[in-house]
Image: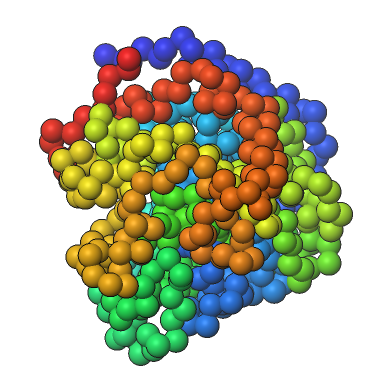
Amino acid sequence: MRKKIPIQHLRFSILASLFIILTIFSCPVYSERPNILFCISDDQSYSHAGANGDPVVQTPAFDRVAREGIRFTHAFCDAPTCGPSRSAILTGQHIWRLEEAGNIHSTLPKKFMTYTELLQGSGYAVGYTGKGWSPGRLAAGGREVNPAGHQFVKRKLKTPFKGMSALDYAANFNDFLKQVEKGQPFCFWLGTYEPHRGYDLENGKRKGRDPAKVIVPPIFPDHPTVRSDLLDYYMEIEHFDQMVARAMKLLKISGQLDNTIVVVTSDHGMPFPRAKASLYDAGSRVPLAIQWPKGIIAPGRVFDGPVNLSDLAPTFLAVTGLQVPEMMTARSLMDVIKNSPTNNHLAAFIAMERHDGCREGGKGYPCRAIRTNDFLYILNHESGRWPAGNPNREFCARYIPFGEVDSSPTKTLLMENKDKPGFKRFYDLAFAKRPSEELYLINKDPGQVVNLANNQEYAAIQKKLSKQLRERLIHTEDPRALGLPAPWDFYPYYGLRRNKKWKVDPKP
């Protein structure tokens, strides 16, 4: 029996189709519109790339794109969790505007237009390999295919370490290129599952890397377990980088590199405590480099202004000559590409709703943040909740304590030594409850460990950033800022439930 399509989905589909048609016929026709190769790793923090200053991890492909294009030193994901971050990238909108897509293990409602759909409607070949929009259920939002494009996954390889995906991402990109019609522009999403956990333990040491050279972030104790864990993470970043290098070589061989916009970034920060699923830099600041030989003015630059990854969607539409939909609230990077900076990039905005909902009733940890070059200000809406999930695993879908933090040697180290000298401070940074407001001075405190909120010396700064954040939230219609019902705690959860008793509270 054919499934009946809800009338609201039908309306939105018709409106989206009309927008695409109008966009195509109202925009100038370009004889050689640029291609787009979007390369995105899974769980990589800003610091962990050679061009960004790390002395151990080897990322020659990222470094090349940064050297020959533009390196962004203050790029931030819109949410430090996979699904919401990818939804924001695709739609060019803050996660608080995306209804269910503001949660991981959810859906992306069809009414929210994506740059990929608009490009495909204008004649682009669109495809992806690896991790596109994920994780969640697209059918629940009225979608039949992944918005990243048509999937290419036939090619496999023998991975160097356990825990890595067997997908040969670059070979799958080559399969995509072979089916693109001659002269047809393309948009391809190369998304690896690396460096998402789990890892082949001590793979970094087996590769001959020196743990003594690892820079340990100030949010962790300087301990052999942490150093080894970071090395294992680096090896997976290098796997991603090798795939980017091979993909770029394919473009060079086919003569398409000069007119291809190559973007290299990550969906959010590293899978470590006080990083992924938090609004601190370790969770939200990501590597970003863009190369486009035919389009970037004065390549080889560094751009220091704060930008969000959602800014990429209106950028891709602008460079291909398409109209940017009004619903896209992100800010195009065309001014940066053309080397004519504006005041559009003075602050980035980051948010969090429900990650794995490891609290009673499947609740999330709603928070919003504004990040300038100098300060990070965070507003925690439910400071009485555990930010990393309840200590009791009974409240977690994944059936692990502090379940918002991925299991890892570093997490285990902190939990098992929480009462020992030299560990409690790091344990509290990772797992303890947080105040309703946080303020950090970046140049003096790059790890964001000293909260200056309610410090009289910074009262004026705190008030200014709070006002600036609130104005942005109201302007972009965040239900929490408008005093409207905020339904994220009650949306369906489509992830695996290792805890069979775990459930989301019904709507009040």
Answer whether residue 20 is visible to the viewer in this image: no
Residue with the most extreme top position? 7
From the image, which quarter does the N terminus lie in?
top left
The image position of residue 336, as x and y in percent, is 78, 55
Point 48% across, 60% down: residue:
449
Point 52% across, 26% down: residue:
480
Residue with the most extreme right position? 340
- The part of the image, by quadrant, that contains residue 231 is bottom left
Answer whether residue 436 is visible to the viewer in this image: yes
Q: How many marks?
A: 0
User: Relative to 11, is 219 on the left or the right?
Assistant: left
The image position of residue 150, as x and y in percent, is 47, 44
Q: Along the line of sight, which residue is nearer the eye, 22 or 213?
A: 213
Residue with the most extreme left position? 500
What's the image's color scheme?
rainbow
Q: Residue 346, relative to residue 217: is it above or below?
A: above
From the image, which quarter does the C terminus lie in?
top left
The image position of residue 411, as x and y in percent, is 28, 62
Residue with the most extreme front position? 456
Q: Residue 80, relative to residue 59: is it above or below?
A: above
The image position of residue 24, as x and y in percent, is 73, 31
- The part of the image, by quadrant, that contains residue 177 is bottom right
- The part of the image, by quadrant, that contains residue 203 is bottom left
Point 67% across, 35% down: residue:
467
User: Relative to 306, is 7 on the left or the right?
Assistant: left
Q: Residue 136, relative to residue 69: is it above or below?
A: above
